[in-house]
Amino acid sequence: MDKVVWITGANSGIGKSITLKFLRNGHKVVASARREEEIKNILNEEGVDESDLIIVPLDVTDPEKIANTYELLKEKHLFVGLINNAGATSFQNALENSISEIKNIIETNLLGSIYMIKTLLPEMVEAEGGRIINILSVVTNKIFTSSSAYSASKAGLEAYSKVLREEVRENNIRIINIYPGATITPIWPDKALEKFSSRMMNPDRIADIVYDAYSIQENIVPEEIVLRPVKGDL
């Protein structure tokens, strides 16, 4: 069976860049996102072999759909890697955040990632190996206003994955947390991109570092990687 890496939020931003990086380096990728048509656009990118890309429309907040999708895929594929990148935010202060916004952010960023981990982890434990990379954020160690729900979701996933790391060390499973600062992605409002894009990081460069961390074969693992623009946070 083919070895594959499952990447969530693969349709845009950092997730798309990571997906392209893995595909261009000969990996087979299960690319998932809510918007299937946007994932299909990856097929138009240079250096992508259509046979290496498995497109999966998926909402990570739906654990039953994740489980059902996995059951279908595992018949032909071995899951050796998971990259949790699907994310949501609102750029609202705590007073203005609606309950529905908070629910979507927590369910996508925190619970969605946990659902993905819970689905693939048993296979990795049985195989005595695997790689799980969580795309977190510098909000876990620095206060940014208008980001309370987003910060809570990322800090929650950080705590979960740090405990998980200790529990699965004996199974040769690597848990890598990536903490990007401001990066040029569609998650930012247009006004912020217009004003700050010259200072922001390129998602392709983030993908380069994620891929390098994933690819290490020796008895070493970069567990926590913080990435910031040279001129600092916005």
Image: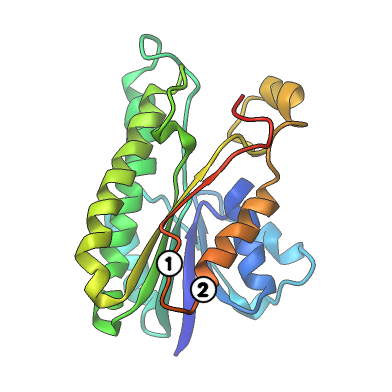
Tell me where residue 45 sits by quadrant.
Answer: bottom right
Say which of 97 and 202 sits in front. Answer: 202
**Tally of numbered tags:** 2
Tell me where residue 115 sits by quadrant.
Answer: bottom left
Residue 25 % position (x, y):
66, 75
The local secondary structure at tag 1 comes to: loop
- The answer to whether residue 37 is seen in the rendering is no
- At 63% from the left and 38% from the top, the residue drawn is 183
- The answer to whether residue 211 is seen in the rendering is yes
65 lies above or below 54? above
Residue 99 % position (x, y):
31, 21
3 lies above or below 58? below
The N terminus lies in quadrant: bottom left
The local secondary structure at tag 2 comes to: loop
Q: Reading the chain from its start, which is encountered first: label 1 or label 2?
A: 2
Residue at the spot of label 2: 216
From the viewer's perspective, tell me whether residue 191 is left or right of residue 161.
Answer: right
- At 44% from the left and 55% from the top, the residue drawn is 58
Residue at the spot of label 1: 221
The C terminus lies in quadrant: top right
